[in-house]
Amino acid sequence: MAFPQRFLDELVARNDILDVVSSYVHLTKKGSNYFGLCPFHNEKTPSFSVAPDKQIYHCFGCKKGGGVINFIMEEENLSFPDAVRFLAKRVNMEVPEETGDRESGRLRQRVLELNREAARFYYQNLQQPEGAAVAAYLERRKIHRKTAMDFGLGASLDSWDGLLTAMVAKGFTKEELLAAGLVVQTKQGRLYDKFRSRLMFPVIDIRGDVVGFGGRVLDKSEPKYMNTPETIAYSKRRVLYGMNLAKKSKRPNIILCEGNIDVITMHQAGFDNAVASMGTALTVEQTRLLSRYTKELVLCYDNDGAGKAATQKAIELLNGSEFSVKVLQLPNRIVDGQPVKQDVDDFIKNQGPAAFEALLSGSENHVEYRMAAIAAKHNFADDQDRIAYAAEVSELIAQLPSAVEREVYAGRAAEQSGVSKEAILLEIKRAQRRFYAKEKKIQQRRELNPADQQQPSERSFHYADVRSAMAEEGVIRLLSRDESLFPLCAQLHHEEFSSPLLGKIYGALLAQQEEGQSSHVAGLSAVLTPEEMSHLSLVLQKPESLTNAQQALADYISVIQASYQKRCGDKETDPLLAAQERFQIKKGYGGKQV
């Protein structure tokens, strides 16, 4: 174990989960628990629960859960050791660390320091004659000097090892340069700069750390854009370019666009609420980051095929979330009488900030956008196309939660297609009936197989013996709620559990007791994976009365041991299973893995 259990127990005790989670999520008390919108997935109805008495959280929607350490790991994108350090710093605790974790934390810190020095190196290049080509490119793109300074723009040299040489001279090792993704190693072991002859965009997270870089070529060579690979400090799924500046904006929303240049142009034009993803479609992790600063998003992607596809994916991801979503469609530019597609950068430079502000004010909500996309596929002069449109648009409108919304958009669909509003509303009702019928069939299949409802959602945790596993869950719940019951488990061993995971949890709880520690389930984050902690939080959310707890525990133990004896008997009658069991014991695997 990387950290002493006593230290982790104190850390968990001093970082009350309600206090920690409340700094990220608005919670409302309901009974003994607190509920809010889950920060880990998009939802409009609160399904995220915090149980202060158990010091755990659980989301009934996405099924994630655990203790305060798991919450920080997930929310801040940190490893277990780094999450421990984060919480220790929060309450001014000194962290006792072992060599492996100390080295991991030190490497991440060194990578961040290296990135900061590299950003300074690139920025200084831009001010030197060697950076003249990049400076000229910025001038052509009408990016002002102050804007370049605000974003820390820089220039990588037309050199194989300019950055490598400069950083080694500052005391950084080649291993650290590789870990930061700033250099590439050949098969022969030679190192060279990853970024050469490019306009450099430092990627700065919301804490102000330079976590990575993007680089753009100055000509038409490929690849046009190049980004830092995944590193110990950088995950493109969790970062938004420009978010460190946009989080300070006074505007009521955040604009999502496609590229770094678009973000820079928009900020320069006064739209300081613009951000962009780094070479990836919008991700759940990015929406969680956005939810800290706004509840209204404006999608402003390019108006080409790729941009429209990105818009559609983002809408699908955000559908049913707490965000109010609008879509800003950029009009084509007319050149020599022909329509030419344009991006945000083109539009603002050609039409000006006022024209973009007008577009922003008139941006459509996502339902209008999707209805327009459906209409564009159909010819309303053709009866079959009108029928097809009515069917497709009704499927979309049927998904809207508000009856008023369905009424309004049914009217708009009718006006556009020439089909009566009554007919559209009838199609919507049919679509709803089909949806409910499908859901009912799924529920009926579940009810016909009640054992399936008890199975964990994570297939790797599948219960081979559901009856025994339900009793095993009961034992864990009782022990986590009443430590005085532990002596009654003297004759119950974790090897007798049918579920390897539940046996592992039970063994960990026993180990805490044997070491004289309190049985804090939140403290098990050190020995359980995030997925295992999520399952444990679900187990603990199930009801369990402490009335007649001793008898209930005895009954559970009886079921577990009877099932174990049956499994052992089955193995004795199967020569192959018996041989496998003997082999495991001989090899020192210990308990049975059933």
Image (cartoon, rainbow, N blue to C red):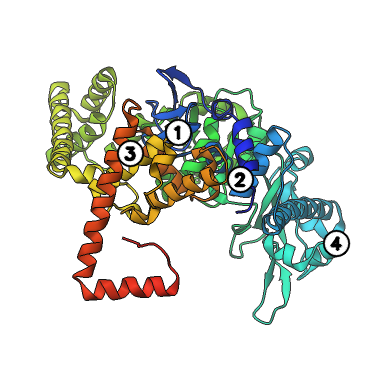
Q: CA distance from mark 2 to mark 3?
A: 25 Å
Give left or right: position of 571 versus 285: left
Decide which of 589, 124 is in the foreground and name it.
589
* Crowding at mark 3 (Cα within 10 Å: few <14, some 14-19, many 20+): many
Nearer to us of marks 1 and 4 is: 1
- Amino acid found under the numbered disc labelled 4: Gly
Residue linked to disc 4: 171
Secondary structure at badge 1 equals: helix
Q: CA distance from mark 4 to mark 2?
A: 37 Å
Instruction: Give the mark nearer the N terminus: 2 vs 3.
Output: 2
Judged from this view, the residue extending furthest toward the bottom is: 188
- Amino acid found under the numbered disc labelled 3: Gly
Q: Are marks 1 and 2 in contact (CB under 8 Å)?
A: no
Provide residue 565's location: percent of width, then percent of height: 25, 57
Per the rendering, the mark at residue 474 is 3
* Crowding at mark 4 (Cα within 10 Å: few <14, some 14-19, many 20+): few
Residue linked to disc 2: 5
Residue at 26% x, 31% y is: 399
Provide residue 143's location: percent of width, then percent of height: 72, 42
Instruction: Give the mark nearer the N terminus: 3 vs 4.
Output: 4
